[in-house]
Image (spheres, rainbow, N blue to C red):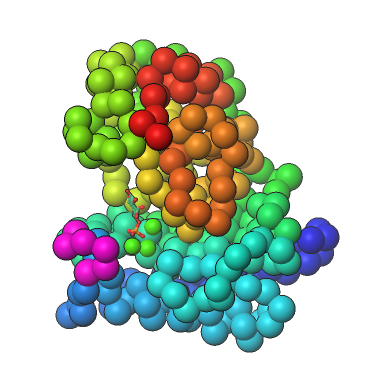
């Protein structure tokens, strides 16, 4: 994707996100149709679906040759990242959307032949837009975010961590090592939107985020934004993220990344 095309797609993507966000804000107090997906706590609403449908139509109208990889099934059947693929989570943090009416985001990552070109995370209720264009740094609204240099030591760090991974029976990771991590660091946070947690790392207000289960649309935009400020986004054992399949993830500033992997993550499989 050349610079001119990148700029055009970026402007359109921001316009779609702003329009979708406005629709969600206007209807935040409307009655909801809430269904469940993989289990009783895996929620989806008519607004998740309508928002993704809006992206599907908008992308098709403006960029008919582009493809959509989205959570709610309005996109293409994506088997590879050839060409331009928009990886969209229409509402990241649906449980927060339903229960709290805040702390959820629209997440849009645009990839060209597998390379992350544009990342947008929109905190809908706060009206805060995090963006990045490859090679041009990252922004919170109009303010450029600082490079993640000279960051905190692990003992001073706040790490995003869901308590799920501390339960002994969790099938993914040695919970005892994670308990050691919790004891070592300053504190943990769980915001309930992977996209926002990535945005907070880019902003430098959180030091890391460790999770054992994400889908590509949870991480696609955030990875680009975090990378643009010099942060690292890998699997929980330090490998490249597979943007087509479920993945583990450790995102952090560079100072703590390898230390967390080396001393505190032992995957079960
Ligand atoms: C979820 C959120 C949550 C994370 C889950 C995701 P959704 O996305 O990002 O923070 O822990 O793994 O599935 O379903 O609300 O879009
Ligand atoms: Ca979901
Ligand atoms: Ca999500
Ligand atoms: Ca979602």
Picture coordinates of residue 198 (x, y %)? 45, 43
Magenta span: predominant SS is loop
Q: Quadrant of ligand 2?
A: bottom left
Q: Residue furthest front?
A: 269
Which residue is pictured at 56% across the width and 53% down the height? 243
Span colored in magenta: 36-41
In-image side of 236 versus 42 (left or right):
right
For the residue pair 83 and 98, the one nearer the viewer reads as: 83
Q: Residue at x 37, y 77 (%)?
A: 49
Image position of 259 (left or right of 227): left
Q: Is residue 65 left or right of residue 98?
A: right
Where residue 244 appears, as percent x and y from the top left, is 55, 56
Whether residue 103 is visible here, answered yes or no, is yes
Residue toward you, 58 or 168: 168
Is 199 situated above or below 165?
A: below
Tell me how many marks there are.
0
Against 176, residue 8 (above or below) is below
Nearer to me, 217 or 207 = 217
The location of residue 97, given as percent across then percent down, is 26, 63
Determine the residue positioned at 60% across, 78% down.
59
| Figure quadrant of the N terminus | bottom right
Q: Residue at x 26, y 26 (%)?
A: 175
Q: As rendered, which of 23 and 109 lies closer to the eye?
A: 109
Q: Quadrant of the C terminus?
A: top left
Q: Can residue 205 be spotted in the picture?
A: no
Q: Position of residue 42 (x, y in %)?
A: 24, 61
**Magenta segment includes 53:** no
Q: Is residue 53 above or below residue 118?
A: below
């Amino acid at each position: 994707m050349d610079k001119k095309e990148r700029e055009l797609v970026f402007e359109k993507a921001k316009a779609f996100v702003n329009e979708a966000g406005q629709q969600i804000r206007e209807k935040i107090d409307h009655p909801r149709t809430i269904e469940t997906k993989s289990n009783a706590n895996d929620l989806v609403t008519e607004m998740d679906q309508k928002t993704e449908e809006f992206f599907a139509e908008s992308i098709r109208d403006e960029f008919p040759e582009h493809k959509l990889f989205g959570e709610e099934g309005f996109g293409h059947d994506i088997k590879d990242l050839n060409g331009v693929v928009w990886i969209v989570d229409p509402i990241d943090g649906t449980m927060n959307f339903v229960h709290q009416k805040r702390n959820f985001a629209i997440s849009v990552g645009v990839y060209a032949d597998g390379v992350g070109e544009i990342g947008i995370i929109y905190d809908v209720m706060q009206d805060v837009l995090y963006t990045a264009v490859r090679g041009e740094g990252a922004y919170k609204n109009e303010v450029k975010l600082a490079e993640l240099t000279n960051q905190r030591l692990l003992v001073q760090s706040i790490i995003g961590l869901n308590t799920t991974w501390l339960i002994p029976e969790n099938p993914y990771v040695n919970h005892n090592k994670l308990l050691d991590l919790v004891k070592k660091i300053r504190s943990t946070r769980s915001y309930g939107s992977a996209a926002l947690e990535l945005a907070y790392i880019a902003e430098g207000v959180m030091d890391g985020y460790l999770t054992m289960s994400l889908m590509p649309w949870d991480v696609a935009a955030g990875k680009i934004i975090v990378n643009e400020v010099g942060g690292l986004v890998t699997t929980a054992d330090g490998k490249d993220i597979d943007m087509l399949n479920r993945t583990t993830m450790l995102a952090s500033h560079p100072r703590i990344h390898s230390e967390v992997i080396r001393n505190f993550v032992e995957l079960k499989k």
